[in-house]
Amino acid sequence: MSTFIQQLPALLGVVIGALGSYLVVMRGEQVRFRRERETRWEERRLSVYADWARALKQSITLTYRVASHLGDDPHPHPLSPEEAAPLMAEATVARDPSGEALLLLGSPEVVEKARAWVVTVMRMEEFLRAGTRDPAAWQVLLERQRAGREAYYVAVREDLALPPGHAARWQLPSPPPHYGDGERLDQGDTDRPGAGDGGPPGAGDGGQR
């Protein structure tokens, strides 16, 4: 018994050491698991945020083309309201799934900025459905859309701890004096990106407009 008692401190030390090692390993595994899970969710949220922006962009591009037909926008590929109607309806339906994913996974701030952005796009669609021919008023809506897009991306970057990004506005040459159905753009819109909304030259529909 005396021998056991003499060895007891050493045995307790071994047990405590083993327990401590186990706890350290478990703690490390928990931290690693949380980091991996956070990384997966961040990647998933980034995908959802990008999908939403891409889906909304389809609707926005169609509005530029219809506005060009009405003489409100310099987009190089005008589209009549009749031709655009089914495409716009399809684009609206197509963004529903990404919108639901955004509500499910997006941060409250990002969701709010997305709501403000899409409301502006809806105003643009209403403007076109009314057949309005007013380039100056259309320009106001474009500026609101750009501001809404920029606010959305700022919220996304803050949510995902990304570095600040580009404002997506490039200084491009003014559009030709006549476009669309021949009506003249009579405002000095020199910082309008022509056929794009801040997109680089040759970006088709304007890239980031």
Image (cartoon, grey):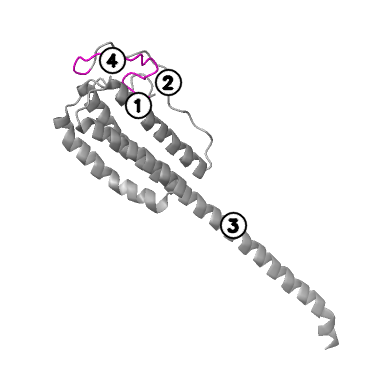
SS of the residue under disc 3 = helix
Residue pointed to by mark 2: 170
- The residues bearing labels 2 and 3 have C-alpha atoms spaced at a distance of 44 Å
Residue pointed to by mark 1: 140
- Residue 158 visible in rendering: yes
SS of the residue under disc 2 = loop
Q: Is residue 121 above or below residue 15?
A: above
- Amino acid type assigned to the residue bearing label 4 in the image: Leu
Whole-percent x and y of residue 3? 84, 84
- The residues bearing labels 4 and 2 have C-alpha atoms spaced at a distance of 20 Å
Q: Quadrant of residue 82?
A: top left
Taking the image as shown, residue 157 lies to the left or right of residue 59, namely right
Say which mark, if any, is on residue 185: 4
- The residues bearing labels 1 and 3 have C-alpha atoms spaced at a distance of 50 Å
Identify the residue at horizontal 33%, vertical 40% (top origin): 119
Residue pointed to by mark 3: 31
Taking the image as shown, residue 140 lies to the left or right of residue 158, namely left
Q: Is residue 4 above or below residue 125?
A: below
